[in-house]
Amino acid sequence: MSPSPQQDITAAIINYGSPQDSAELTRKLESQVQNIIVVDNSNDISSSDPAFAHAEIITPLENIGFGAAANLAARQIKTRWLLVLNPDVRLKRNCLKHLLDASVQMNAPLCGPRFYWDDACTFQLPPALGHPLWLLSDRHIPDSNLAETTDVSELAMARHKRFWSESTPFSEPVLSGACLLFDNDWFKLNKVPLFDEAFFLYYEDTDLCGRMLHKGMMPVCAPQASAVHYWNQSSEPPAGKAALMQASEKIFMQKYYPNGAPPLPRREHRPSITDLGQSRIPPALLLPGTTSHLDIGTQDDFIVFARTAVTQPSFSFSKNLEKRLRPGTYFFRAVDQSDKGLQYWCWQKTE
């Protein structure tokens, strides 16, 4: 595959405990962007490392958080466009071109791709959760009968289906911060900071999209722009992901909903789940005969899930994806063409 030509973009990789992923991503971007900045929040990258010969390494005195690191990079650049990336993202062919085209076509200062979970692009990742911003518009829930539903799993499936059915650039209330293209000139002209640094980690992308919505600028997803995001792979911060997420959620809710946020719809039915036990190797799943898709999540409510189409009576993980699975509990759901849940399993991966 021939590399894409360099474009008027600076890529900013926000590293935390992922020097190998950051190095690989740097190498893949060298021929596609004018400049690369790596903000090393964990101080585990040496500027003399030949893997980063084509990148500028910025090492803060301490971990300043994701949003502050991106803002730091934005203040350094001279290009119009800034691409902010997690180290565990890989851009597919012409991803940057499609992001740029969509941003110009839609006059969108903020644009993002759709993500796959694996290199083979068999598992589709969902739209960013962004509760409660996606409740602001039922355009993002295509079946009007679902607008009054009390089952959050059905809402999540409807959003997933709509998100992956689009074929041209479309408005999306929330984009994932794992890969975002900013028109940095627009943000400077309008004196809008990329990220609110009150959010150390988590919700900084949701807040960004909320601020864009309040300015009448809808974030845009470019469906032709594809990227791989090795979901559930990032390093665990010392404070713990759950604690940091709770702290950021509290800030977000106080900022946008001081009188209380609209609740997520209640879940009325909990399915019967077959426990497949513990093992290092993922189990093979025997699927019901009418299975159309297999969903995988880390919680049994499947608000967030990866989805793949199935055509065989059983499913097994590829070796590459198997290696990427972090230890923990996983939930599986077989669904038919109408998204009816047919069978559910859970499995715990051990070290």
Image (cartoon, rainbow, N blue to C red):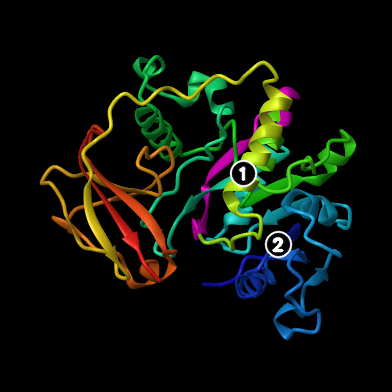
Left or right: residue 161 versus residue 43 is left
Quarter of the image with the C terminus is bottom left
Q: What amino acid is at disc 1?
A: Met
Q: Is residue 209 left or right of residue 41?
A: left
Q: In this view, does 189 lie above or below 140?
A: below
Q: Is residue 267 left or right of residue 61?
A: left
Specify the segment rendered in magenta.
211-232
Residue at horizontal 59%, vertical 27%?
A: 133
Say which element carries label 1.
Answer: helix
**First of labels 2, 1 by sequence position:** 2
Q: Which of 151 and 122 is in front in this view?
A: 151
Occupied quadrant, residue 12: bottom right
Whole-percent x, y for residue 72 in the image: 84, 54
Report helix, strand or loop for mark 2: strand
**Vertical placement of 5 versus 112: above or below?**
below
Please tell me which residue lies in front, 27 or 208. Answer: 208
Judging by the rendered image, the residue that carries numbered circle 1 is 245
Q: Badge 1: how crowded within 10 Å, few (<14), some, or many (20+)? A: some
Identified by mark 2, the residue type is Ile
Kindly indicate the quadrant of the structure image that contains residue 157. top left
